[in-house]
Image: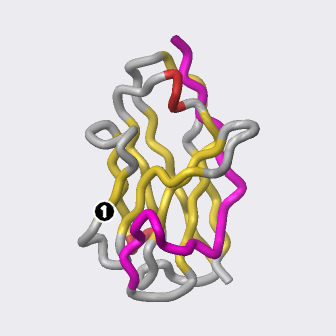
Amino acid sequence: QVQLVESGGGLVQAGGSLRLSCAASGRTISSYAMGWFRQTPGKDREFVAGISWNGGRTYYADSVKGRFTISRENAKNTVYLQMNSLKPEDTAVYYCGADDTPYRLGSPTAYFGSWGQGTQVTVSS
C-alpha cells in the first residue's frame, strides 16, 4: 500500500501563495490518479483538485478554479498543489489522496483509497 506525506502548509496572508507537496512511498504512483481534499472542523472532507494517472486530465472544485493548480512529477513520485490568491475560506487541513485502481481519471467522484495525514493551511485576512 502507498504511504503519502503532505508538506508545505502554513500561515499566509490573504492574497498570498503556498505550494503543497505530497510525497508517495511504498509503490509508484505513476499509474494512479491523485487528488487533493480539504477539511474544516465539523465539515466533511471536500474535493479540491484531481489529476489523472497520466496527468492529461485535471479537475477542480468551483471554489478554487483559476487559483489552484494540481500537477504531478512521477519521477519524484510526488504530486503538488499550487495555491495562489488564497482566501481566508481556504483555511483547512489539506489531504492528499491516491486512487487504488490504476489508469483512472481522478475526477471529483473518484474513490481515493489511500490518504496522507494532512497539512494545515491557514489564511489570515
Residue at 27% over, 68% down = 57
Q: Which residue is mark 1?
A: 58
Residue at 50% over, 52% down = 21
Q: How is the image coloured?
A: secondary structure
Which quadrant is the N terminus positioned in? bottom right
Q: Is residue 22 above or below residue 76?
A: above
Helix, strand or loop under label 1:
strand
Q: Nearer the viewer, residue 106 or 119?
A: 106
Horizontal and vertical percent for residue 98? 55, 72
Horizontal and vertical percent for residue 67? 32, 37
Q: How many marks?
A: 1
Horizontal arrangement in the rendering, residue 75 relative to residue 41 (left or right)? left
Q: Is residue 121 magenta?
A: yes
Horizontal arrangement in the rendering, residue 65 relative to residue 10 (left or right)? left
Horizontal and vertical percent for residue 10? 60, 31
Horizontal arrangement in the rendering, residue 104 relative to residue 29 (left or right)? left
Horizontal and vertical percent for residue 53? 37, 78
Disc 1 crowd, CA 10 A, few/some/many (<14, 14-19, 20+): many
Horizontal arrangement in the rendering, residue 83 relative to residue 13 (left or right)? left
Residue at 40% over, 82% down = 104
Residue type pointed to by label 1? Thr
* Residue ranking furthest to the top: 125
* Residue ranking furthest to the right: 42
The residue range painted magenta reads 104-125
Q: Is residue 38 magenta?
A: no
Q: Nearer the viewer, residue 52 or 24?
A: 52
Q: Is residue 9 above or below residue 28?
A: above
Residue at 58% over, 30% down = 91
Q: Is residue 8 above or below residue 3?
A: above
